[in-house]
Image (cartoon, coloured by chain):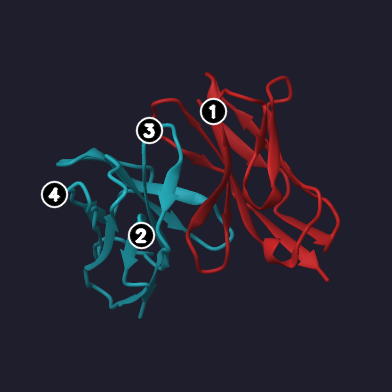
Chain colours: A cyan, B red
Amino acid sequence: DGGITQSPKYLFRKEGQNVTLSCEQNLNHDAMYWYRQDPGQGLRLIYYSQIVNDFQKGDIAEGYSVSREKKESFPLTVTSAQKNPTAFYLCASGEPGNTIYFGEGSWLTVV
Amino acid sequence: AQSVTQLDSHVSVSEGTPVLLRCNYSSSYSPSLFWYVQHPNKGLQLLLKYTSAATLVKGINGFEAEFKKSETSFHLTKPSAHMSDAAEYFCVVSGSGTYKYIFGTGTRLKVLA
């Protein structure tokens, strides 16, 4: 099946710990995105990547980092600098200005 | 600059009655407009999109939307609601060839039996 796979579905972070969310796509899209969703709010862009080895900060990049070493993969690291990381994280891919396709999301909770 | 406003945060309808979810947009150039649906604890699924072709756009599950440039609106409708339509709906604006997508704050649709 073609699509976007995010893992894990649920992740818990301790204070001072970095955690990484995985995102893999087999849609052959150049562009990939990471969004954060808080309850009752819309999606906010964290980072996006137009092509391999390139990525750009979105609206709320502080406390997050990404890499894009392969076309299929765009992992997101939530660092200890992110003081309020509890949220639902969504990965997406697509062609610019056209439909973007989403993964099933990952829940991150601070314990 | 682009922006999108979903005029209702919550909408309740009875099963079998029409659905109307309202979306207004602002764009300094010809926009691409989308409606997505999100069920609890899931990712977003595309319902339909407008990309400067026909102004009346038909989507999946019986939904459709009409692009009205004069009113800067892109409202989502369905003639008859089903219980499975209960979800959150997002209106999204973008531009041809851009990487920027602006999401509305969402409308939660409740369908009453």
Amino acid carrying mark 3 in the image = Pro
Q: Which quadrant of the figure contains the C terminus of chain B?
A: bottom right
Question: Disc 3 on helix, strand or loop?
Answer: loop
**Separation (CA) of disc 4 from disc 2:** 23 Å
- The answer to whether marks 1 and 3 sit on the same chain is no
> Which chain does the residue under circle 1 lie in?
B
Q: Earlier in the sequence, mark 4 or mark 3?
A: 4
Q: Residue B100's spot in the image, x, y percent?
A: 41, 35
The residue nearer to you, when weighing B38 against B63, is: B63
- Pointer 2: what residue? A1
Is B81 or B10 nearer to us in this picture? Answer: B81
Q: Earlier in the sequence, mark 4 or mark 2?
A: 2
Residue occupied by mark 1? B51
Residues tagged 1 and 3 counted as in contact (Cβ below 8 A): no
- Tell whether A104 sits left or right of B4: left
Q: Decide which of B43, A28 is in the foreground and name it.
A: A28
Circle number at residue A69: 4
Q: Give the Cα distance between marks 4 and 3.
A: 20 Å
Q: Residue at image x 40%, y 58%? A: A103
Question: Which chain is mark 3 on?
Answer: A
**Callout 1: SS:** loop
> Between residues B32 and B81, which one lies in front from this camera angle?
B81
Between the residue at mark 3 and the residue at mark 2, the CA separation in whole angstroms equals 23 Å
Residue located 38% across and 64% down the image: A84
Secondary element type, mark 2:
loop
Q: What mark, if any, has residue A96 been given in the picture?
A: 3
